[in-house]
Amino acid sequence: MTTIRLTAAQAMVRWLSVQLAEDGQPFISGCWAIFGHGNVAGMGEALHGVRDSFPTYRGHNEQGMAHAAIAYAKQLGRSHAMMVTSSIGPGALNMVTAAGLAHVNRLPVLFVPGDVFANRGPDPVLQQVEDFGDGTMTANDCFRPVSRYFDRIERPEQLLTALPRALRTMTDPADCGPVTLAFCQDVQSEAYEWPESFFTPKTWRRRRPQPDPVEVQSVADLIRAAESPVIVAGGGVHYGHATDSLRRFAEATGIPVVETQAGKSVLPWDHPLNLGPVGVTGASSANAACAGADLVIGVGTRFQDFTTGSWALFSRPNRKLVSLNVAAYDAMKHGAEPLCCDAEAGLAALLGQLSGYKARPISDRLKADWFADVDPLTAAPEGNAGLPTDQQVIGAVQRASGPDTVVMCAAGTMPGELHKLWKGTRPMSYHMEYGFSCMGYEVAGALGIKMAEPARDVICMVGDGSYMMMNSELATAAMMGQKITVVITDNRGYGCINRLQMSTGQVEFNNLLKDAHGGPNSNIDFAAHTAAMGATSVKAGSIAELEAALARRHEVQGPLVVVIDTDPYPSTPFGGYWWDVAVPEVSERKEVRAKRTAYEEKLKDQART
């Protein structure tokens, strides 16, 4: 047997560089790295050796660079992914939040944090977290609950099995998610005689599990018996590359489609069968269809509480539930009739069983009335009408967008408003991380999207609160010359949660800066801050000035940031649905007690399956 003498770290990156996606390019497109104690020697030397074929990108914060890697994979529909490496202690733990984000959203990313010495010679090593009762525990064990596959590399030859398991997980549509290979730092630098065959290029093809004929027949029978079914389209439609299949299925059957946050843009906003966003942040058109549906057909959705109105939205008596999902865990939720398979294959198989079937036509007034209500909210204001609203900001960005625009966000006020108001024109033109709704994803995520699709016009919508949580990768975008547009809406605090606090009968407290201890002293100059990191920055004093700045964005080299002050209180008064937020049972305030009474009444509508 012919062997190659390499360190374990060199073997890892060489092996990863020849693992190919279906397009013939490496499935792992490169590595994000912040070097430190635990990865600078072994992994650093290894990455330097392959820097021309397996690029290394330097981040400014471990969580931020992981967000960029995850957004990259999401925007490419999980067809490619990235690796992220860090030091052994704080650097590793900084990535745990990002691992949770990837786990919730079923997105592939390879975490390779440094770890303690396997030989325990210098024990306890710098940054080691010691467990007094378990000598095998390290900080990296925090990754276990937020990894789809976890391994600790304590011998070089363990990579012979660990690496294929990692790629199997990341490329499997049902098990897809984050992988953590905690890499002991002495092992990274240890040499081993590797079989030359280990580095033979391999293509990882997307598995498309085919439907079970019995499940197809059962679901088809339910559809045939339904008069007013509705399709709830989730992110799995995008990841399964099944947007065309969904459109054909909907058009052939007449079944209307509603979109989750992850599923938004699976159909163009103006398609006659697209009733718009569903649930807590949904349109009245979509929610009316769901409330009256006798059969709810989930396609690629995990039925998050925002989608289901905390399981109070699908309220028609005796309604049935179907879940077409590649993951059995999701296909079986809430007593659904499962169709566990690839989305494209499942829709095709169902369509073959539904010849001649047509659902009851939906009223054209549902969509017309919705847009009649909300379009005025996004229109440009006339004259001096005070601080702009988030809805008016969205309208300005929409008017400035084009066919190549990708709008993205993650947390705060904007996700709900964008879900309701943004008009997506093509698949993956709307990039929302709302599974984890992680504050601070936005700027780094925008960078990852731009790296995934360089020709796209990427516009990041972020509030001042989320921007303050994580903004360091704006400096990375500037350093790399990546052309992204960031719109910062400054409402001087956490406006979304402030409104939620008020809706439960409480007084405004600790959310807006004016109501926080010392908050009135805050005076952050976001334009100056972003300019200091290398962005071209503009402070817009009105919607007209925002539109003028956006119109010039294609002339700017590197990132453009436009800051605009907004009113923290208005939200879209139309659409939406109840969300289960537990109101205190005991309070001295009559407003809270009244909200508790209403809350208990609404709990009666929840489906308990």
Image (tube, grey):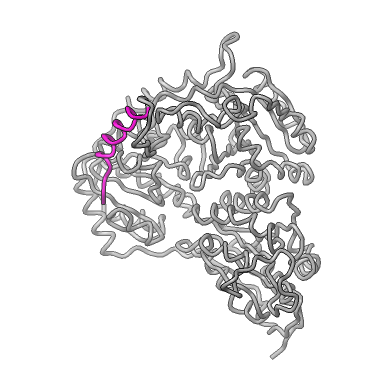
Specify the quadrant of the image occupied by residue 250: top left
Q: Nearer the viewer, residue 579 or 366?
A: 579
Query: In the image, what residue occupies the spot 61% across and 27% down?
Result: 492
**Nearest the camera: 322 or 434?**
434
Q: In the rendered structure, does residue 605 fall within the stretch colored magenta? A: yes
Q: Is any atom of residue 14 visible in this view?
A: no
- Residue 141 at x, y = what percent? 58, 66
Residue 464: horizontal and vertical position, in percent?
Answer: 63, 32
- Residue range in magenta is 592-609
Image height of 597 relative to 296, above or below: above
Q: Where is residue 600 in the image (x, y as percent from the top left)?
A: 28, 36
Q: Nearer the viewer, residue 133 or 98?
A: 133
- Picture layout, residue 49 above or below residue 465: below
Queried whether the magenta region covers residue 266, the answer comes back as no
Name the residue furthest bottom: 1
* 601 left or right, relative to 383: left
- In the displayed structure, 95 sits above or below 248; it is below
Judged left or right of residue 217, residue 136 is right
Prevailing secondary structure class for the magenta stretch in the rendered image: helix
Would you place residue 53 above or below residue 136 in this image?
Answer: above
Q: Is residue 268 visible?
A: yes
Looking at the image, which residue is at 76% across and 54% down?
Answer: 58
**Direction from residue 535 to residue 341 in the image, left or right:** left
Identify the residue shown where x is 74% and y is 49%: 60
Q: List x then y, in percent, for residue 346.
A: 36, 57
